Amino acid sequence: MVENIDEKIYAYALENAHSHEGRAQESSVLSHLFKDGLKKEEIREVMPKIKEAVRKVNSLNPKELEEAFSNYKQDFEKLKELKRAQEKERELPELPNVREKMVFRMAPYPSGALHIGNAKQFVLNALYAEKYNGKLILFIDDTIGSEAKPIVKEAYELIPESLDWLGIKYDKEVLYKSDRLEIYYEYAEKLINLGRAYVCSCRQEALKKNREKGIECECRILPVEKQIERWKKMFKAKQGKYTLRIKTDMKNPNPAFRDRVLFKITERKHPRAGNKHRVWPTMEMSWAVDDHLIGVTHIIRGIDLVMETEMEKEIWSIFGWEHPTVVHTGFFTIEGIEGAKISKSKAQAEIKSGKFMGWDDPRTWSIQSLKRRGFIPEVIREFIKRFGINQNNIVAPIENFYSINRKMIDSTANRYFFVEAPKKIVVEDFPASLNSIDVPIHPEKTELRKLKVFPELYISEKDFNENKGREVRLTNLFNVILNGKTKFLDSADKSVQKIQWVSDKFRVRARILMPDGKWSEGFAEKNIEKLKADDVIQFERVGFVRYDKKKGATYEFWFAHR
């Protein structure tokens, strides 16, 4: 494809017109440029070029259009081939050790709602379960956790709600770690009786030094009978008194692998189990047991859990169990997110403090918040699918996510006018015969919407200040000179800056909740009164939004993206 931006815009306009009965659309050209990496801050710079290219292309007769497009036809054929190759690359690669019956599991820790980042592993497991027609188990990993990362009670509902909305099909029976403590105790005693686990009462500082030097502590060498006795004492002992540790090679090259904790005492109350249990397993202990008992064949998890995987393998080997196939994926970072880093812990704190309105606050980037902003589940699935089980760390621009959503909803999102921070203008010499205009509800639809027009109009204060004293075009209406007295111009020049407007007597109050949690307040055209909750529309020159509800006299929307 050509690299010169002016020629590229012209080529995209030609291709769009060639594919749509001779009429190019500015929005379609802009969409092509977004796919090429155009940033939203560059829109203002390229829009005049797009307008001129579309005007030029739309003035061609069919023969001229065909001749002009023939100069780029080969480029677009190559582009189509490239896209087909990219689609093929995006297909999920085969997993190792494929078998007739594949079993996967999702293991969310209920410290909050799933968000766009940590949903990756769950969606990948679901996609592979679909690919192999396998079984997918939802297993809530609600071991006690840490004081710094406590369980959130509402997460027990938020997590399945997210997965259901994403269209993830999992086994009807949802499993919970907090229901299975007696099972873990049984296998703990088996490890003790095999001489592969011991109860340790050493102070943390001394233990750390011993592990670094590869020295066994006194607790490790006590006989099995004594270990069982100490194990039973753990259930009544104070927090921090004992831990159950696995016996590994104290000369292992990685000190972190030496005699890791399998069980610890905690006196904290569990949101689901209350104070029924005081001795809780670590992640690797509980998963080593459960992955065997529920018959998991393939585990897809993050690269940050490599150590936990090695510990699971150690336990599987001790019991002589078959090892499931484990695939680690790289870290998944999303670049360009408004409002900083995505974090369940941060969201939990901000919700508790009252700064965030709840788990669907747009600043959480939870699945619930994305749904409320108007994204569709297929977008999240496709976005994650494109990165697959790549073991390299990935940085994904948020604009890629927006681009997928834009492509999926653009053809169905009807267009309306919205003016932020409105400023009233009165048009002098307003045409007496003009009382309404018919405007397409969508560039690719024949349906029209009627806009009533009066001399008293509203435009945004920003547009007024930036264009004061200049000729501008009120979108789909006419040209004016913006000033203290706004003058009507009998001009057909459509190359000037276009600005949104609403009529004084054909408007309603509206506001849009932005990704940073702030409201954009203004007026929208009265036609939005016909919208239903959850309708996704595009406010022209603003972006895609989802209609949420009417609050008093104000219509509330949630912003998705431009």
Image (spheres, grey):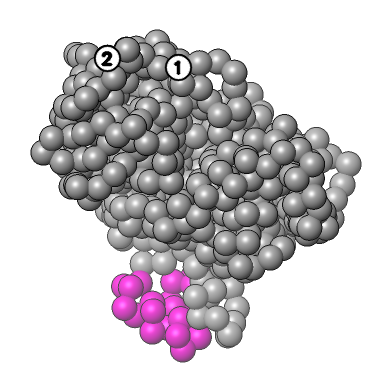
Which segment did they paint magenta?
Answer: 202-223
57 on left or right of 145: right
**Mark 1 surroundings: few (<14), some (14-19) or many (≥20) residues within 10 A:** few
In the rendered image, the vertical position of residue 468 relative to residue 203, given as above or below: above
Secondary element type, mark 2: loop
Instruction: Residue type at mark 2: give it.
Output: Ala
Depth check, front residue: 296 or 234: 296
In the figure, residue 11 lies in which quadrant? bottom right
- Residue 47 location (% of width, % of height): 46, 51
Report if residue 218 lies within the magenta region: yes
- Residue 4 location (% of width, % of height): 61, 68
Q: Is residue 319 visible?
A: no
Q: Is residue 469 visible?
A: yes
In the rendered image, the vertical position of residue 414 relative to residue 479, given as above or below: above
* Image point (68%, 65%), residue name: 2
* Image point (15%, 41%), residue name: 483
Q: Looking at the image, which residue sits at the far left?
A: 484
Quickly name the residue at label 2.
Answer: 432
Quickly name the residue at label 1.
Answer: 438
Instruction: Residue type at mark 1: give it.
Output: Asp
> Number of callouts in the render?
2
Secondary element type, mark 1: strand
- Residue 188 location (% of width, % of height): 55, 52
